[in-house]
Image (spheres, helix red, strand yellow):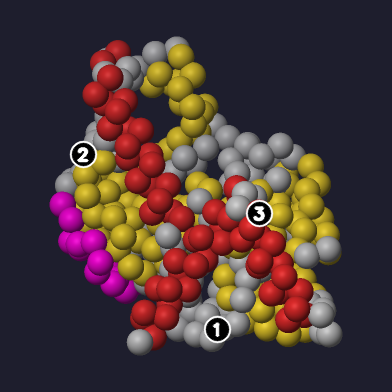
């Protein structure tokens, strides 16, 4: 029963997000507004607490936004970077929640400056500063850089698939306590490194690469649900774990899977063995993190101050 309720809520959460982003369907909005107005006519919704942690953040970093209202409600949005984000209910087991939380991934290379986070009619400031990223020149065979039309078709299809995976995160936290590193080996390529293939700039590396010989067990950063365990074009054999509330982690180029889609994994459990599958020049682990559909520096997860989790 519990499970079904959470599934329904999750579905509704995603629909709300779409509704908020598209801003269409005026009839639905009108009806929605009317019922909300009627309900809150005598007791208007007020924000009692509005906390942003930290207030100053690097690009590709992670910010926690917490809001406490004077009464429970069934949805809450924040507007940041001209986008609407749906909060996650702290009281996720109930129909309505008085306290809400939003983990916000700051986009890579978000211009430094002050930004507004708006909830209802209240604005708070968030300061973003730039991180110093490295540059890396790689010499590879041209056929490993250029995509054939079939490859491109596959890449676009997988991009769409991953987008839907990132948007379907559980409403409740699946994690417990701290997020740990997947390996204790040196990082060979940091998040955000600008990649220049054969003298041509080809975008940035949006993950962290760890040194790992083929066969080395890869530990999952925290408890969660395996939502992807399949072969993808760029990251080869890939495992993606949903930690809930918009937080997911990714493990790429594996030689072997130790888990299957649908499995629930404990923190530090092996999700697979390191390898060299996908578009690689040698064996290593590609570790990625996604927060509210934004790829962030995964190392940031290990610095998250966690008070929640079972
Ligand atoms: Zn990588």
Q: Nearer the viewer, residue 289 or 268?
A: 289
Indicate whether residue 32 is drawn in magenta: no
The answer to whether residue 61 is seen in the rendering is no
Residue at the location (39% across, 63% down)?
242
Q: Residues within 10 Å of mark 1 (few under 14, many from 20)?
A: few
Residue 115 at x, y percent in the picture: 78, 48
Task: Report which residue position mark 2 lands on.
Answer: 277
Ligand 1 lies under 8 Å from the Cβ of mark 3:
no
Ligand 1 lies under 8 Å from the Cβ of mark 2:
no
As displayed, is residue 146 above or below residue 240?
above
* Range shown magenta: 256-270
Q: Is residue 31 left or right of residue 221?
A: right
Count of numbered marks: 3
Residue 43 at x, y percent in the picture: 82, 84
Task: Report which residue position mark 3 lands on.
Answer: 26
Viewport quadrant of the N terminus: bottom left
Helix, strand or loop status at disc 3 = helix
Q: Residues within 10 Å of mark 3 (few under 14, many from 20)?
A: few
- Mark 1 and mark 2: span between their CA atoms? 44 Å
Residue at the location (54% across, 54% down)?
18
Chief SS of the magenta region: loop
Residue 20 at x, y percent in the picture: 62, 55
Task: Report which residue position mark 1 lands on.
Answer: 95
Q: Is residue 260 left or right of residue 190?
A: left
Q: Earlier in the sequence, mark 2 or mark 3?
A: 3
As displayed, is residue 282 above or below residue 39?
above
Residue at the location (28% across, 72% down)?
264
Helix, strand or loop status at disc 2 = loop
- Mark 2 and mark 3: span between their CA atoms? 48 Å
Instruction: Identify the disc placed on residue 154.
Output: none
Residue 133 at x, y percent in the picture: 58, 35
């Amino acid at each position: 029963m519990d499970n079904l309720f959470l599934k329904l809520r999750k579905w509704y959460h995603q629909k709300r997000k779409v509704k908020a982003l598209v801003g269409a369907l005026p009839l639905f909005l009108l009806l929605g507004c009317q019922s909300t107005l009627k309900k809150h006519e005598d007791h208007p919704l007020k924000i009692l607490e509005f906390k942003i942690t930290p207030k100053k953040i690097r690009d590709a970093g992670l910010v926690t936004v917490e809001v406490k209202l004077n009464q429970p409600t069934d949805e809450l949005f924040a507007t940041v970077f001209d986008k609407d984000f749906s909060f996650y209910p702290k009281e996720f087991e109930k129909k309505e929640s008085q306290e809400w939380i939003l983990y916000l991934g700051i986009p890579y290379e978000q211009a430094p400056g002050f930004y507004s986070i708006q909830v209802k009619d209240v604005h708070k400031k968030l300061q973003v500063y730039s991180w110093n990223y490295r540059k890396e020149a790689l010499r590879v065979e041209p056929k490993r850089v250029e995509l054939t039309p079939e490859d491109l078709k596959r890449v676009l299809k997988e991009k769409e698939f991953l987008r839907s995976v990132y948007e379907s995160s559980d409403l409740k936290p699946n994690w417990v306590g701290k997020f740990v590193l997947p390996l204790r080996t040196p990082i060979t390529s940091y998040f955000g490194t600008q990649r220049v293939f054969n003298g041509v700039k080809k975008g940035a590396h949006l993950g962290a690469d760890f040194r790992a010989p083929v066969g080395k067990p890869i530990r999952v950063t925290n408890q969660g649900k395996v939502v992807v365990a399949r072969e993808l074009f760029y990251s080869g054999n890939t495992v993606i774990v949903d930690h809930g509330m918009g937080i997911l982690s990714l493990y790429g180029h594996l030689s072997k899977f130790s888990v299957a889609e649908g499995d629930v994994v404990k923190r530090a459990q092996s999700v697979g063995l390191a390898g060299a599958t996908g578009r690689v020049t040698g064996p290593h682990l590609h570790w990625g993190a996604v927060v509210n559909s934004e790829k962030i520096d995964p190392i940031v997860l290990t610095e998250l101050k966690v008070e929640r989790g079972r």
